[in-house]
Image (cartoon, rainbow, N blue to C red):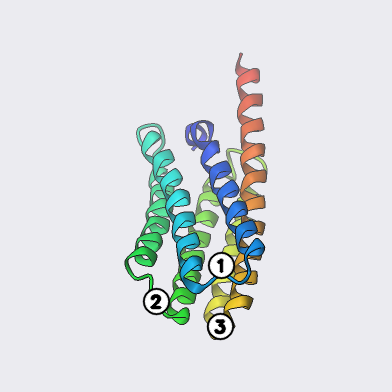
């Protein structure tokens, strides 16, 4: 897991930056039609998932738990594919798709953080991000009939919070990797 972190801390940063950009765009344009929300979500899911898959594939020979990151990426890409194939989804189905993605990726982030707890300090940030994702997913399933504008604000908040947590964790991981390199030099 240490090697994975050394080689792939950037994946956390990419996920964080994309989530923040997605959240800001959704806030700037709260009157987005549902179709544009589908497009924004699909782009977010593809880029986030693609960066996770790339990190996992790059490190598959170095770390035996690379498959967790791969699974995380595939889930996000799958959610993006569904959004693209069926752009005329009803608001309810889109809400449930986003909620399901948040639930699954949140659980996988918590599982990854548990694996990292012996390797780095600050894994609680990834756990917190995972818990926020799971809570968001649960709220989406509990209140699927919320209005489109309320949904956009909720999605924006979710993306901004998880993006900030992932970016913070990436910066801490990068600092840890650098301190480890200096210690071994």
- The residue indicated by pointer 2 is 89
Q: Earlier in the sequence, mark 3 or mark 1?
A: 1
Q: Nearer the viewer, residue 28 or 58?
A: 28
Residue drawn 62% across and 33% down?
Answer: 174
- Tell me where residue 122 appears, x and y as whole percent: 67, 44
Q: Position of residue 94 (x, y in %)?
A: 45, 74
Relative to residue 23, is residue 73 drawn left or right?
left
Q: Is residue 135 visible?
A: no
Q: Which of marks 3 and 2 is in front?
A: 2
Q: Is residue 63 left or right of residue 19?
A: left
The total of numbered circles placed on residues is: 3
Q: How far apart are marks 2 and 1 (CA)?
A: 23 Å
Q: Quadrant of the C terminus?
A: top right
Q: How crowded is mark 1: few (under 14 residues within 10 Å), some or many (20 or more)?
A: many
Within 10 Å of the Cα at label 3, are there few (<14), some (14-19), or many (20+) other Cα atoms? few
Upstream in sequence: badge 3 or badge 2: 2
Can residue 137 be seen here? The reply is yes
The earlier-in-sequence mark between 2 and 1 is 2
The tag on residue 142 is 3
Against 82, residue 5 (above or below) is above
How many angstroms separate mark 3 from mark 2 (CA)? 19 Å
Query: Residue 134: which numbered mark, if any?
Result: 1
Q: Are marks 2 and 1 in contact (CB under 8 Å)?
A: no
For mark 2, does the 10 Å Cα neighbourhood hold few (<14), some (14 to 19), or many (20 or more) residues? Answer: some
In the displayed structure, 95 sits above or below 17; it is below
Asked whether the residues under the numbered discs 3 and 1 touch, taking CB atoms below 8 Å apart as contact, a structural biologist would say: no
Task: State the residue in front, 35 or 13.
Answer: 35
Q: Image point 60% across, 29% down: which residue?
A: 177
- Which of 58 and 120 lies nearest the eye of the viewer? 58
Secondary element at image label 1: helix
Q: Which of marks 2 and 1 is in front?
A: 2
């Amino acid at each position: 897991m240490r090697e994975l972190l050394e080689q792939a801390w950037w994946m956390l940063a990419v996920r964080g930056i994309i989530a923040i950009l997605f959240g800001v765009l959704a806030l700037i344009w709260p009157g987005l039609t549902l179709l544009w929300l589908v497009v924004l979500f699909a782009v977010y899911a593809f880029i986030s998932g693609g960066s996770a898959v790339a990190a996992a594939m790059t490190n598959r020979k170095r770390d035996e738990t690379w498959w967790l990151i791969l699974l995380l990426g595939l889930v996000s890409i799958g959610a993006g594919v569904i959004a693209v194939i069926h752009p005329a989804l009803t608001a309810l189905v889109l809400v449930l798709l986003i909620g399901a993605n948040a639930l699954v990726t949140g659980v996988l982030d918590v599982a990854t953080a548990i694996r990292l707890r012996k390797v780095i300090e600050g894994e609680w940030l990834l756990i917190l991000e995972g818990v926020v994702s799971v809570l968001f997913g649960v709220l989406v399933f509990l209140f699927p009939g919320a209005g489109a504008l309320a949904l956009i604000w909720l999605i924006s908040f979710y993306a901004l919070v998880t993006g900030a947590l992932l970016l913070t964790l990436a910066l801490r991981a990068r600092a840890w990797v650098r301190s480890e390199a200096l210690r071994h030099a």
